[in-house]
Image (cartoon, coloured by chain):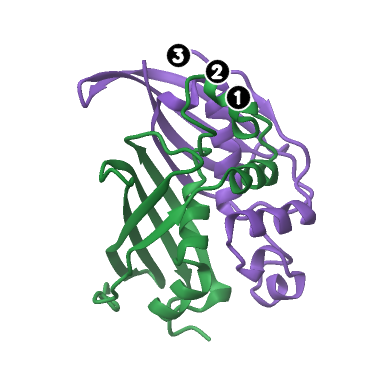
Chain colours: A green, B purple
Amino acid sequence: MESLLKADVKLKPFQFTIERGKIKEFAMAIGDKNPIYYDADTARKEGYRDIPIPPTFPTAIEMWGGMDFETLIELFGLNPLKVLHGGQEYCYMGEICAGDTVTAAPKVISSFEKRNLRFITIGIQYINSDGKDVLYSESTIIERGGSKNE
Amino acid sequence: MSELKMIHKPEITHTQLVKYAGASGDFNPIHTVVPVGEKAGLDGVIAHGMLIMGMAGEALAEWFPRKDLRRFKVRFSKMTRPGEKLTIEGRVTGEKWEDNEKRLTGEVSVKNEAGEQKLSGRFEFKI
């Protein structure tokens, strides 16, 4: 049995300004030593406006921008001990660098239960301060055992 | 199809998961607090899926210019724990046209030393 769950959950748009230090911290945590994430001169020599974001940095924009773990747990009524990340997709339409402010418009793409697993897919469209589409992120989270377990 | 240079990552540590929690802002305690991981039935903590995708992203930007990356999509298949050593493998699968540009398509996967696949994904770079 599939059932729609809390399909009416509304996610709030949010803004985030990307800082060089945050990019460096993120790259260091991954152990990514690519110099374009650490040094603005190197990044410029490689043709970037400033230090670019690593491919998965949008997760930091989301978590620090307002769509953090606790907020999602509460909004969707999930059991935090049972939540896993099932899949993630990024489409990169424009360059995002340190100094940029992006505006994110998140929405619930789908939310359903199947074989005792609950699947929630959230899509986020990002525009830069010129109003240009720069990024699309789509994330699927899975709650094991369904919402009624425990 | 052409295989890309394998990337070997050092062993994942508890400290790295704490660092990644802070850097990413994902403070789900199943990644950092051992008793919570045990309570969740995970036999300890598990790495953030996004950390593993981040390692795959590191490999992508080593194989091709970061600025030409257009799409990156992954599915997480197995959990990763501190103590595991991961390797990122990739290959070019073909070419396509999208949005009036020619793109190279490829596959990426992350495995541990036993060959267990943690993540499988696909990517596209403008060429």
Same subunit, tags 3 and 2: no
* Label 1 packing within 10 angstroms: few (<14), some (14-19), many (20+): some
* Label 2 packing within 10 angstroms: few (<14), some (14-19), many (20+): few
Residue B104 in the figure: left or right of residue B66? left
Label 2: which residue?
A: A45
Q: Check whether the beta carbons of the residues at disc 2 and disc 1 lie within 8 A of each other.
A: yes
Going by the numbered disc 3, the residue's amino acid type is Met
Nearer the observer: mark 3 or 2; the answer is: 2
Residue B107: % across, % down? 46, 29
Label 3: which residue?
A: B1
The span from disc 3 to disc 1 (Cα, nearest Å) is: 36 Å
Q: Examine the rendered structure and indicate whether residue B18 appears above or below residue A143.
A: above
Q: Quadrant of residue B45?
A: bottom right
Instruction: Using the image as rendered, state which of residue A68 and residue B83 is in the foreground.
Output: A68
Residue A91: % across, % down? 34, 39
Q: Check whether the beta carbons of the residues at disc 3 and disc 2 lie within 8 A of each other.
A: no
Label 1: which residue?
A: A41
Residue A33: % across, % down? 69, 31
Q: Examine the rendered structure and indicate whether residue B25 appears above or below residue B6.
A: below
Same subunit, tags 2 and 1: yes
The span from disc 2 to disc 1 (Cα, nearest Å) is: 6 Å
- Of all chains, the one bearing label 1 is A
Q: Quadrant of residue A123?
A: bottom left
- Of all chains, the one bearing label 3 is B
Give the residue at x 60% y 24%. A41
